[in-house]
Image (tube, rainbow, N blue to C red):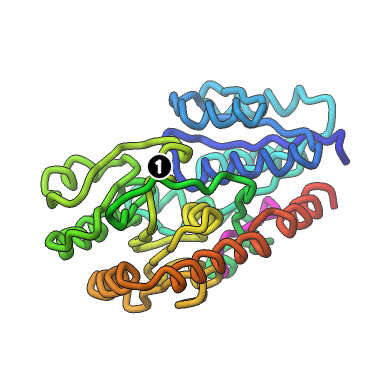
């Protein structure tokens, strides 16, 4: 089993949920002494991801952005290989190539949103070709859309530091890609609603196509920090807000709870699989900014014992169900079964 190499194949230009998952998956497999490397369809200069892979001591290589390159690379492999694809482009190319070579292909479907235009078209092709691979999906909602699929919950390393900087304000954070499906405009509107509250500050960590418009109309109580390494921003956040319009199982949700942070989220994707409302976090089932605002203010006014109980419960939830042990069993069954 250990002699079989697993190649994680993706096409990545930004650092988001898929990229975070890749790093966690690399660490999990290497911790169990499995042979793993990362293969990029082409080099988009995703420096943060490359640094994280270097930190994980994982080899990675680049194709030239041509479909035939994957065929040539896999055909040259002397030992058995598992090709594990992530993202629609890598998924489509990987499955078709493995079919031609009669090689094992595993795909993880991360997307919580259908997309528009060409992205919508490619997502459709991605799901239509799912019968060519063994598949993982990150939420129950995707099960009916993907052939040969089982749910593989995202997971995170729980051995991370949970230190935090002192602050005289409650620091509320948005972490993720600044694109429509992630709802950063909802977060900015939340900040605007609470602009007169002197006890709360808002911080955006991430980048994306909506950044210029959001920054040009932001209220005074919000700061945009751009993309930063997780080691730089988690100690600056007390509360994570997830204001997305669509999700799978957000990696950022698990990362925050693993660091004993309070999470307040819209009811999207598989969030309710992780958060038990008012026990280890908060879900705003109306998916409206008014409820986000009310919940955040209520948390701000809560006593220390209440906050400690919620955040400790958050950590224990991740420790018990989303730390990788169950997921490793699923992965090895599909990889080597």
What element does badge 1 sit on?
helix
Please check the rendered image and state whether residue 132 is part of the magenta-colored stretch, yes or no: yes
Q: Residue at label 1?
A: 233
Q: Split into 4 quadrants, where in the image is the N terminus?
A: top right
Q: Which residues are magenta?
A: 131-140
Residue 131, quarter of picture: bottom right
Residue 178 position within the rendered picture, expressed as x and y whole percent measured from the top left:
31, 47
Q: Nearer the viewer, residue 105 or 15?
A: 15
Classify 245 as above or below 218. Answer: below
Q: Examine the rendered structure and indicate whether residue 19 appears above or below residue 144.
A: above
Q: Is residue 62 left or right of residue 305?
A: right
Side of 194 where 6 appears, left or right? right
Where residue 62 appears, as percent x and y from the top left, is: 57, 23
Q: Is residue 118 above or below residue 240?
A: above
The 10 Å Cα crowd at callout 1, few under 14, some 14 to 19, many 20 or more, is some
Image height check: is 318 above or below 126? below
Could you tell whether 104 is left or right of 313 in the image?
right
Q: Is residue 133 magenta?
A: yes
């Amino acid at each position: 089993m250990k002699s079989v190499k697993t190649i994680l194949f993706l096409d990545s230009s930004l650092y988001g949920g898929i990229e975070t998952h890749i790093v966690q998956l690399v660490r999990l497999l290497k911790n169990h002494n499995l042979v793993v490397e990362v293969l990029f369809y082409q080099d988009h200069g995703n420096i943060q991801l490359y640094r994280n892979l270097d930190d994980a001591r994982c080899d990675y290589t680049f194709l030239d952005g041509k479909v035939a390159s994957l065929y040539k690379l896999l055909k040259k492999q002397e030992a058995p290989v598992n090709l594990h694809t992530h993202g629609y482009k890598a998924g489509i190319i990987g499955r078709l190539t493995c079919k031609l070579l009669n090689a094992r292909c595993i795909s993880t479907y991360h997307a919580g949103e259908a997309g528009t235009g060409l992205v919508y078209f490619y997502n459709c092709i991605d799901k239509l070709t799912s019968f060519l691979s063994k598949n993982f999906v990150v939420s129950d909602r995707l099960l009916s859309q993907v052939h040969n699929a089982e749910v593989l919950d995202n997971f995170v390393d729980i051995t991370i530091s949970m230190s935090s900087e002192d602050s005289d304000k409650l620091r509320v954070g948005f972490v993720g890609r600044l694109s429509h499906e992630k709802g950063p405009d909802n977060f900015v509107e939340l900040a605007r609603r609470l602009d007169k509250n002197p006890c709360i500050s808002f911080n955006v960590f991430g980048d994306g196509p909506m950044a210029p418009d959001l920054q040009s109309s932001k209220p005074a109580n919000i700061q945009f920090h751009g993309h930063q390494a997780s080691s730089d921003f988690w100690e600056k956040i007390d509360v994570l807000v997830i204001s997305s319009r669509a999700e799978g199982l957000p990696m950022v949700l698990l990362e925050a709870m693993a660091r004993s942070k309070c999470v307040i989220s819209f009811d999207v994707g598989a969030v309710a699989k992780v958060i038990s409302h008012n026990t280890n976090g908060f879900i705003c089932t109306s998916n409206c900014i008014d409820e986000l605002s009310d919940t955040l203010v209520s948390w701000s006014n809560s006593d220390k014992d209440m906050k400690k109980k919620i955040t400790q419960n958050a950590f224990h939830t991740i420790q018990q169900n989303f730390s990788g042990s169950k997921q490793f069993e699923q992965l090895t069954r599909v990889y080597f079964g």
